[in-house]
Amino acid sequence: MSSTSSNKIFRKARELFHNYQFRTAGFKKPRAYFNWARANLEMMGRKTRIRARPLKTTVDITNVCQLRCPLCPTGLEAHDRESTHFDFDKFIKLIDEVGDYLFFLDFYNWGEPLLHKRIEEFIHVAKKKNISCGISTNLSLKLTDERIRKIINSGLNEMVVSVDGASQEVYEKYRRRGDFDLVLSNMRRFVELKREMGSQTPCIIWRFLVFGFNEHQIETARALSKDIGVDLFVVTSAFLDEGFYPVPDSERQLMSDWHPTLEEFQLYSGQREDGTFIPKYKPNVPNRCDWHYMSSAINADGNISPCCALFSSENDFGSYDPAEKNSYMSVLNNEKYTAIRSKFNGERSETTELVCETCPATIIMPYGYGVNRDIIFMTAVQFYKFFKNLFSSSPKK
């Protein structure tokens, strides 16, 4: 095995260890593990109606963002929803209904989560149910030390910071309106205050999306991450314009040379005449979507999308509104959900005219693999911690 391959394996193992070590939120009650088994049985049996509660869900705590990233519908100002923050009382009702069964909760999708002034309270509520909580942030906003301490104290497990460059000039090509120095300063303060408070969480992850214009700065950024002291530095391929979002022609022309030259980060084989990119690998479309059995994306307005890739309200499957007696589980078994499950399992022959039939993001349809893997590994890590503490606290003879 070459030294390069060995380094990659070691780096990946280190990432996994850190991820699961800090993302564990404690053991769930037995009913959560029974529900986990039920969700998998219903998924494998491709049931039309489900009884299992979600294992993971996305709550878009706000759809507001101060940046203008050109491959994001929020950055493109292409949303057809009102700009809003998720209602706290509605969240309390959601956790009352499904919190005992949830293993993971992501507080982000189309906005900057730290713009919600009460996000720490949301996280604190979820942590009472031993739910592993994560956010993805651009961190390009002014934060007081007091606010950072509140975020750390909330019990947040994971904080992904999106920084795609090692200088302002390169960083702002995608993270438009972002302040590179402010982001680095905020990361340093999080690291320092975590150390001062004796907290291992949140696990701070610098995520670097690779484009053609920034690939030369990967190693410089990696060195910066080590200097700052973040827990992980993750380099990943960027999804370019495939025609899913309404990207202006002027932007498409600008992005024509954004495809990386480094082969390991290349997701596309070429471009169409309109400038959109052609995916290099076309995954096989499965006869089910795991999202329909294990998860969903709850938007800032309370409407439920069948997955995290759908931003338009016209593709919503229902509205979570406990005040109107629209429970979360009633939405997951409504006409649209049962129609698409029956279409995928073969019970229904006619079209549903729902977006899932022509899924624009087939790569995330086998979602259950990642969810099941995370539950298995995080539970194993939790057992490891339990026995480690047990034996370390045992009196020596």
Image (cartoon, rainbow, N blue to C red):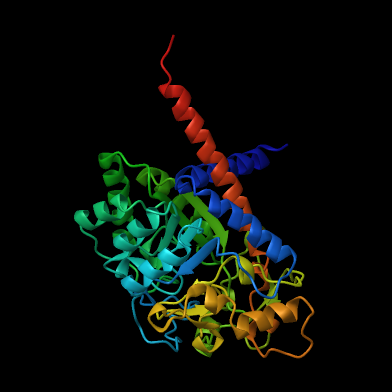
Q: Image height check: is 234 above or below 88?
A: above
Indicate the position of residue 152 as horizontal and vertical percent values: 31, 51
Q: Residue at x 45, y 89 (%)?
A: 80
| Lateral position of residue 133 relative to residue 183, left or right | right
Residue 213 relative to residue 370: left or right: left
8, above or below 215, in the image:
above
Q: Can residue 112 be seen here?
A: no
Q: Residue drawn at (43%, 12%), measured in percent from left and top?
A: 396
Q: Nearer the viewer, residue 232 or 271?
A: 232
Residue at the outermost top position: 397
Name the residue: 59% across, 57% down.
Answer: 35
Which residue occupies the foreground of this view, 100 or 77?
100
**For residue 328, above or below residue 206:** below
- Residue name at image x 41 percent, y 23 percent: 393
Q: Residue 362: which quarter of the image?
A: bottom right
- For this view, does 319 lie left or right of residue 179? right
Image quarter of the C terminus = top left
User: Do we see residue 230 in this rendering?
Assistant: yes
Q: Toward the viewer: 247 or 256?
A: 247
Relative image position of residue 88 (x, y in whole percent): 32, 71
Q: Quadrant of the N terminus?
A: top right
Q: Examine the rendered structure and indicate whether residue 188 appears above or below residue 68.
A: above
Q: Position of residue 387 (x, y in %)?
A: 50, 30
